[in-house]
């Protein structure tokens, strides 16, 4: 996916299997909980991994959530 496609996708909302930032934010808690628990978050929340790979802001949010949960 090119940068232009990603920007366009943010304006138009999710059109494919990849989720948008809003969806990502909604589901990130669940995704990270499953990931930290050793489950399969990509099956539980399809499109999240693809989104994180293309969205540094959400990836950073993801990483800090993982760190938070692992610190408990
Ligand atoms: Zn995002």
Image: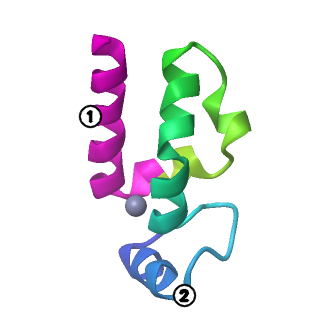
Contact between marks 2 and 1 (CB within 8 A): the answer is: no
Residue 59 image position (x, y, % from top left):
34, 46
Image quadrant assignment for residue 44: top right
User: Callout 1: few (<14), some (14-19), or many (20+) C-alpha neighbours within 10 Å?
Assistant: few
For this rendering, which residue is in front, 60 or 71? 71
Q: Nearer the viewer, mark 2 or mark 1?
A: 1
> Would residue 7 appear left or right of 29 to someone viewing this image?
left
The residues colored magenta run: 52-72
> Magenta region, mostly helix, strand or loop?
helix
For this rendering, which residue is in front, 31 or 1? 31
Q: Which residue is located at x 28 percent, y 56 percent?
A: 57
Name which of mark 2 and mark 1 comes first in the sequence.
2
User: Callout 2: few (<14), some (14-19), or many (20+) C-alpha neighbours within 10 Å?
Assistant: few
Q: Is residue 52 above or below residue 70?
A: below
Quarter of the image where ligand 1 sits: bottom left
Q: Residue most toward the right?
A: 43
For this rendering, which residue is in front, 49 or 21? 21
- The answer to whether mark 2 is within 8 Å of ligand 1 is no
Distance (Cα) linking label 2 and label 1 = 28 Å
Name the residue tied to disc 2: 12
Q: Which residue is located at x 56 percent, y 80 percent?
A: 13
Image quadrant assignment for residue 40: top right
Residue 58 image position (x, y, % from top left):
35, 52
Q: Secondary structure at mark 1?
A: helix
Q: Which residue is located at x 45 percent, y 56 percent?
A: 25
Residue 45 image position (x, y, % from top left):
66, 44
As drawn, the label of residue 64 is 1
Q: Which quadrant of the rendered structure holds the C terminus?
A: top left
Q: Which residue is located at x 48 percent, y 31 percent?
A: 32
For this rendering, which residue is in front, 2 or 20? 20
Residue 56 image position (x, y, % from top left):
29, 54
């Amino acid at each position: 996916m090119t940068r232009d496609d990603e920007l366009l996708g943010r304006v138009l909302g999710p059109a494919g299997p990849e989720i948008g930032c809003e969806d990502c934010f909604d589901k990130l808690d669940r995704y990270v909980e499953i990931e930290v628990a050793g489950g399969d978050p990509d099956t539980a929340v399809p499109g999240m991994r693809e989104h994180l790979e293309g969205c540094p802001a959400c990836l950073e949010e993801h990483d800090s959530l993982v760190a938070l949960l692992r610190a408990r």
